[in-house]
Amino acid sequence: MPIYDQQAECVSREELAQLQLERLQATLHRVYKNVKFYKKRFDALGFLPEDCQSLEDLARLPFTTRYDLAASYPYEMFAVPLREVVRIHSSTGSPGNPIVMGYTCRDLRTWARLAARVLTAAGVDRDDVVQVTLAYGLMTSAFGLHYGVELLGASVIPTGPGGTVRQVQIMRDYRTTVLISTPGYARVIADALEELGVDPKTLHLKVGLLAGEPWTEAQRAEIEARLLLTAYDNYALSEAMGPGVAGECEHRQGMHLNEDHFYPEVVDPATGAPLPPGELGELVLTTLSREATPLIRFRTGDLTRLDFRPCPCGRTLARLSRIAGRADQVVVVKGINIFPERVGQILAGVVGEAPVYQLVIGREGALDYLEVRLEVREGLFFDKMTAQREFLQKLTTKLAQGIGVRPRVKLVEPASIDRAQETSPLVIDLRR
Amino acid sequence: MLTLKSVQAGYGRLVVLKGVSLHVRAGEVVTLIGGNGAGKSTLLKAVCGLVPVRRGAVEFAGEDLTRLPAERIVSLGLALVPEGRRVFSSLSVAANLELGAFHRRDRQQVRRDLEELMGRFPILRERASQPAGTLSGGEQQILAIARALMSRPRLLMLDEPSMGLAPKMLAQVYDILAELKRSGTTLLLVEQNARAALKLADRGYVLETGRIILQGTAAELQEDPEVQRAYLGKGYREVWE
């Protein structure tokens, strides 16, 4: 199988370490000079960027969390003047304000190249027709791989999500060879094929690049059997860049992380202490080339292991094991990170007092749904059904705007959510 | 080929290089750009052993240069074309060239190399017996480069080869560098003239007050707004919003 950037992806570990050190030092100098947040952080420690003499010294610096990014809303994390930023993305899945990410021209070019690496590793080439069913919008979802496809010279069909019947029609008539989607949506498409009586053998699918929500090997096998394609896992992190951070090669034993652009650490989620290679822990990434919004030791919240052993494909880049879950309370629904506290904040904004609530995530068929249960108090009793319906609608809209997913809101009786008990935690995930 | 890891160096109590890391691969042309006093010349001197390295490592072809005296470093295949040419002005052009090979023992080959270089740079043959001090600035620069080549270097380092040259001579000097690049010579080029240097180089680093703040391919750096503003004279310094 071809490798998109042989020199970078098969670099000797020694050369890679030198490149990482050079890029890390330049990044530290730039954030110290241009980002107040980091200057304050470093000053508080008495740390100067030149004190970073080796990659190991990075561990002396504190973590950056999603809370930090949300508190820097909108532009406090930017390391370049706004006029040099050519793209702004933001994620709704943050504990407070949205997280805003900027991209310079060079950032976008890097993004495309890294996405092209991930696509090439999955066997995509210029003869392919690629259907992108991820969302085009504020979030980074569809964009990274879209750029990568164009850079490879393949054809991209930017369908975006939804409209499954039309998706299937396009897939068949345009002779789509590569499907880019979430694992859940791949199964929705498989269901639609059955309903519409379309035999997958009449399609031309060859490869699926799936990401955006936790999935299992069993689901991979099911998707492969029903859509007659080879499914590859890839890792996207919008705060760091978007899709293109890591992806599987033909051996599918973990996702090759683009280590020349992202320096990885795996830490104990409870103590923050670095863990030896191969241990399961929370992934922490430092961006090495990002210009607009660089991140130092960003806690991804994703649980994984790092495998530095050589891969038979020839790439020397370390591999991330399949994401085993979240280290924090974040739940992923339809590829969107949801912070339960954020739901609480929105509810408090509408109800006007500290709400008692609970999130229930389940799966209907192949698709995830989110249910928000809110305890009704005296203030919320309505004599008229219409008033109650209006209230529910308002609440649903507010939540959809705030978290990026349209939930079902269910009003429940007072004291029916017992939050003191372990049996009734803030989040119930029925998908597991 | 050449690797610097967090190099700290300076003069007396003054620290000029504050942890600089960079590398040059065989066959590559790498440029280091930066303004006056950024530490560019100090970096070259530190590599050559002319300024002591206090912390960090300098590795060339597998050898740790920080422990070697300057004369040993030259014999490893590292040559420096110093800032301001520094030709021996009272000596003839030919004598200057011969001095470039002072450490070599293969006298026969040295003669052949001298002949070859004079063929490559006809101006030097023309002026072979003239004192080097009578040459124009550009001619002296060509002589300085040729003298460095006489040591048959594996890596040629140049300190501001464009300094003080008229545009026509500058073009000529860069033509020579481009030819060296084509013939596979590895170059580390230190320049204030970022435009000329980035046009020639494969990769580059931007040094600012002893720190590397940017690195990338020459094409990327040429398009970088900060490089354009500070070193290519495009746009103007932005007021931070």
Image (cartoon, rainbow, N blue to C red):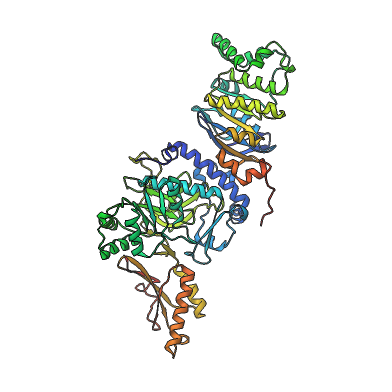
Q: Nearer the viewer, residue B14 or A19?
A: A19
Q: Residue furthest bottom?
A: A383
Q: Residue furthest front?
A: A173
Q: Nearer the viewer, residue B72 or A333?
A: A333
Apparent side of residue A403 relative to residue A189 in the rendered image (left or right): right
Report if residue B5 is visible in the image: no
Q: Residue furthest right?
A: B134
Name the residue at 55% across, 49% down. Answer: A105
Name the residue at 66% across, 45% down. Answer: B229
Apparent side of residue A90 relative to residue A224 in the rendered image (left or right): right
The image shows residue B179 at horizontal and vertical percentages of 57, 25
The image shows residue A96 at horizontal and vertical percentages of 52, 67
The image shows residue B200 at horizontal and vertical percentages of 59, 32
* Quadrant position of the N terminus of chain A in the picture: top left
| The quarter of the displayed image where residue B70 is located | top right
Apparent side of residue A205 relative to residue A87 in the rendered image (left or right): left
Q: Nearer the viewer, residue B198 or B16?
A: B198
| The quarter of the displayed image where residue A186 is located | bottom left
Q: Is residue A354 above or below residue A120?
A: below
Report if residue A106 is visible in the image: yes
Apparent side of residue B47 relative to residue A286 in the rendered image (left or right): right
* Quadrant position of the C terminus of chain A in the picture: bottom left
Name the residue at 72% across, 18% down. Answer: B135
Q: Is residue A78 above or below residue B88?
A: below
The image shows residue B48 at horizontal and vertical percentages of 60, 26
Marks counted in the figure total: 0
Q: Is residue A72 above or below residue A356?
A: above
Q: Is residue B46 above or below residue A238?
A: above
